[in-house]
Amino acid sequence: MREADAQRVLELYRAGIEEGEATFETEAPSWEAFDTAKLALHRYVAVEEDSREVVGWVAAGPASARAAYAGVVEHSVYVDPAARGKGVARALVEALVASTEAAGVWTVQSSVFPENTASLVLHERAGFRQVGRRERIARQRGVWRDTVLIERRSPLVD
């Protein structure tokens, strides 16, 4: 993922916000805020072969600023609705897992709405497990929502 991808990355982020099953956020951040929050080594885009348009992205940021959590990241993955079901998300998550393991990250985590079954299945197939359900963790559009905490512990990183 490069700065040249910023507009499309943020468009896909906005599309996920509008769908209502991806995040509690109500608007996409500026590119500067996004860039600052995400680790440079752990962010990728998927590009459509013919058009060269970005059709998905994955990025991770630190789960905590505390030194003890240096090997734990939290990630997000977004795919254009027109590109879903074609292995884009899987390829992005696999790239993220490879980069985090190479960098010594032992845990990749995320929170997913329980209704987002496609994301939960994708992550399970990529080696993530459900840690627990956080009930009524926050409101979205005035409605309390639950999230499922998922994580992948690296078998390669001690």
Image (cartoon, helix red, strand yellow):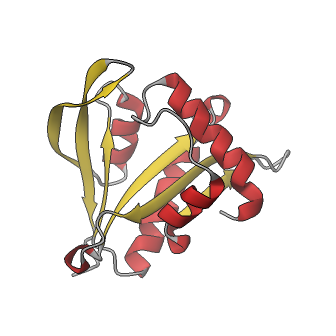
In the picture, residue 69 is in which quadrant? bottom left
Residue closer to the observer: 124 or 143: 143
Give left or right: position of 69 versus 7. left
Q: Quadrant of residue 70?
A: bottom left
Place of residue 34 in the rendered image (x, y in percent of width and height, measured from the top left): 56, 56
Rendered residue at 60%/31% (across/down): 15
In which quadrant of the rendered view does residue 68 lie?
A: bottom left
The residue closer to the viewer here, 152 or 14, is 14
Image point 30% across, 71% down: which residue?
65
Vertical comparison of 115 with 44: above or below: above
Count how many numbered circles sit on residues in the image.
0
Q: Is residue 151 left or right of residue 24?
A: left
User: Is residue 86 something one can see in this rendering?
Assistant: no
Q: Residue drawn at (28%, 52%), measured in percent from left and top?
A: 128
Position of the C terminus, as image quadrant, is bottom left
Q: Position of residue 44 (x, y in %)?
A: 59, 61
x and y percent of residue 41 in the render? 53, 74
Which residue is depicted at the point 24% across and 74% down? Answer: 66
Q: Nearer the viewer, residue 107 or 139?
A: 139
- Quadrant showing the N terminus: bottom right
Where 9 sits versus 2, above or below?
above
Residue 121 visible from this viewpoint: yes
On the image, the x and y values in percent for residue 17 come to 52, 31
